[in-house]
Image: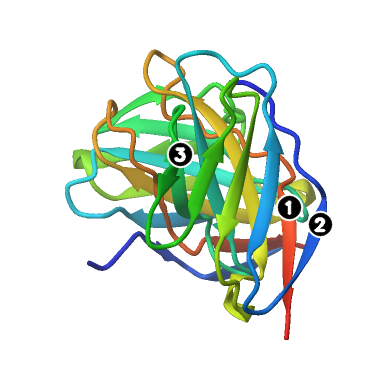
Amino acid sequence: DAKTTQPTSMDCAEGRAANLPCNHSTISGNEYVYWYRQIHSQGPQYIIHGLKNNETNEMASLIITEDRKSSTLILPHATLRDTAVYYCIVRVAGGTSYGKLTFGQGTILTVHP
Amino acid sequence: EAGVVQSPRYKIIEKKQPVAFWCNPISGHNTLYWYRQNLGQGPELLIRYENEEAVDDSQLPKDRFSAERLKGVDSTLKIQPAELGDSAVYLCASSPRTGKKDGYTFGSGTRLTVV
């Protein structure tokens, strides 16, 4: 699976949009971009994923650049409960390596009142 | 939906003792995973099951770790004997049959402390 690079930490004011970047310059054509987050003392939680089109769900939006070498997770109105470690992961959609999530260090997002 | 259930939530043992963790995946999820998360690090895959078959155990330290998933539902991860370096959070996750692109669902994990 391709390697990802994320900032170590970010801050955001409550109610503002949180934009979390991720670089994945070696991503392959059959690899999806996934985002998970992990709140303290809990297991990782799936947020969203995409291949090349922008995606939106009830939790967040995912913007993937046209060359697919980077993406941004957007939390439109951050709350204190969004304080967590956010992981960007690229993962193949099939084959023998399917099913393995390779987590990096992630980005520690702190939402301030 | 109950989610992925793990027990115990916390475990403290002395080194060289055995320990076991239990996981009950989401009903109908054929794929089950065990991950280990060291302090300050992201989770790392130990083993993946498709039904009762271990299809990826390349990262499982087989000299002391073992896992089973009898009947393709619940799973148990065992360490015998435990070492100080095994202190970590052990996470179980499940997902629908391989081929689906949806995300996994993780349990809350078992925090193991070896003293």
Helix, strand, or loop for circle 1? strand
Q: Earlier in the sequence, mark 2 or mark 3?
A: 2
Q: Are marks 1 and 3 in contact (CB under 8 Å)?
A: no
Q: Position of residue A90 (x, y in %)?
A: 56, 29
Kind of residue indicated by mark 1: Thr
Residue A76 in picture, x, y percent from top left: 55, 65
Task: Classify mark 3: helix, strand or loop.
Answer: loop
Q: Amino acid at mark 3?
A: Asn
Subunit that carries the residue with mark 2: A
Which sits in the foreground, A45 or B53? A45
Residue pointed to by mark 3: A54
Image coordinates for residue A16, horizontal then vertical, percent: 65, 72
**Location of residue B69 by image quarter:** top left
**Which residue is the site of mark 2?**
A9
Does residue A79 appear left or right of residue B33 in this picture? Answer: right
Q: Are marks 1 and 3 on the same chain?
A: yes
* First reached walking from the N terminus: tag 2 or tag 1: 2
Examine the image and state in which quarter residue A85 appears.
Answer: bottom right
Q: What's the residue at 73%, 52% (across, down)?
A: A107
Residue B48 vertical position relative to residue A108 in the rendered view, above or below: above
Whether tag 2 and tag 1 are in contact, CB under 8 A, the answer is yes
- Residue matched to label 1: A107
| Amino acid on which the number 2 mark rests in the picture | Ser
Residue drawn at x 62%, y 30% as measured from the top left: B61
Distance from disc 1 to disc 3, alpha carbons, whole Å, reads 21 Å
Answer with the quarter of the image where residue A105 lies. Answer: top right
Q: Label 2, label 1: how many angstroms apart (C-alpha)?
A: 5 Å
Q: Position of residue B7 (x, y in %)?
A: 43, 66
State which mark lies toward you, 1 or 3. Answer: 3
| Circle 3 crowding by C-alpha within 10 Å: few under 14, some 14–19, many from 20 | some
- For disc 3, the chain is A
